[in-house]
């Protein structure tokens, strides 16, 4: 994450979402990791539904759900929510809405998928 996220996302932009002026690299790391915990808990809550529970407890189904979750989190959070949130808090360098900048959105997509796959597969292994 440290070497792939385009600067100044981790040290300036993420802390700015919470009104923290940067550079604040440790704060950016902490906030981003907290977001990951929340997203992991959200994944578990979502796949508890009768509709998804069977697929989520199998490796193949979990892999597809993990891929889908990575895509959905990128579109909802990085493309839609982040530019709106940064504009709402008055961050002067807020990305345009929707935030579909290339290569940044592709990097975000890959990162979210690389996070969501082990979460989904881990869930499948634990619930098998």
Image (cartoon, rainbow, N blue to C red):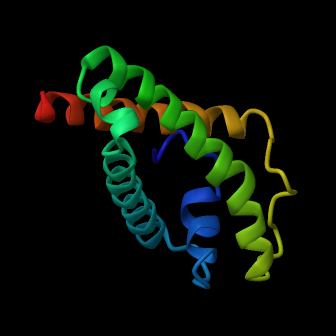
Is 110 placed above or below 63 here? below
Where residue 49 appears, x then y in whole percent?
36, 44
Query: Farthest residue toward the right?
Result: 96
Left or right of residue 68, residue 80 in this image:
right
What residue is at 57 percent from the left and 83 percent from the top?
A: 20
What residue is at 50 percent from the left and 39 percent from the top?
A: 112
- Is 4 or 55 nearer to us in this picture? 55
Residue 44 visible in the picture: yes
Query: Farthest residue toward the front?
Result: 50
Residue 111 visible in the picture: no
What residue is at 48 percent from the left and 32 percent from the top?
A: 113
Is 100 placed above or below 86 here? above
What residue is at 40 percent from the left and 35 percent from the top?
A: 51
Where residue 78 appears, x then y in whole percent?
66, 51
Is 55 placed above or below 94 here? above
Where residue 14 appears, x then y in whole percent?
58, 66
Corner quadrant of residue 63: top left
Q: Quadrant of the C terminus?
A: top left
- Is 6 or 46 nearer to us in this picture? 46
Is 119 placed above or below 6 here? above
- Is 54 or 10 nearer to us in this picture? 54
Figure label count: 0
- Is 97 or 106 nearer to us in this picture? 97
Where residue 7 appears, x then y in whole percent?
64, 53
Q: Quadrant of the N terminus?
A: top left
Corner quadrant of residue 108: top right
């Amino acid at each position: 994450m440290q070497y792939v996220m385009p600067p100044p996302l981790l040290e300036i932009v993420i802390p700015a979402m919470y009104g923290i002026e940067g550079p604040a690299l440790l704060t950016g790391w902490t906030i981003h990791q907290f977001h990951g915990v929340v997203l992991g808990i959200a994944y578990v809550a979502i796949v508890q539904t009768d509709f998804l529970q069977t697929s989520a407890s199998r490796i193949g189904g979990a892999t597809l759900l993990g891929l889908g979750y990575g895509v959905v989190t990128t579109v909802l959070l990085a493309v839609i929510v982040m530019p709106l949130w940064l504009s709402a808090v008055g961050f002067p360098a807020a990305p345009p809405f929707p935030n579909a900048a290339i290569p940044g959105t592709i990097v975000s997509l890959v990162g979210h998928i690389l996070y969501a796959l082990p979460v989904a597969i881990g869930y499948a292994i634990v619930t098998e």
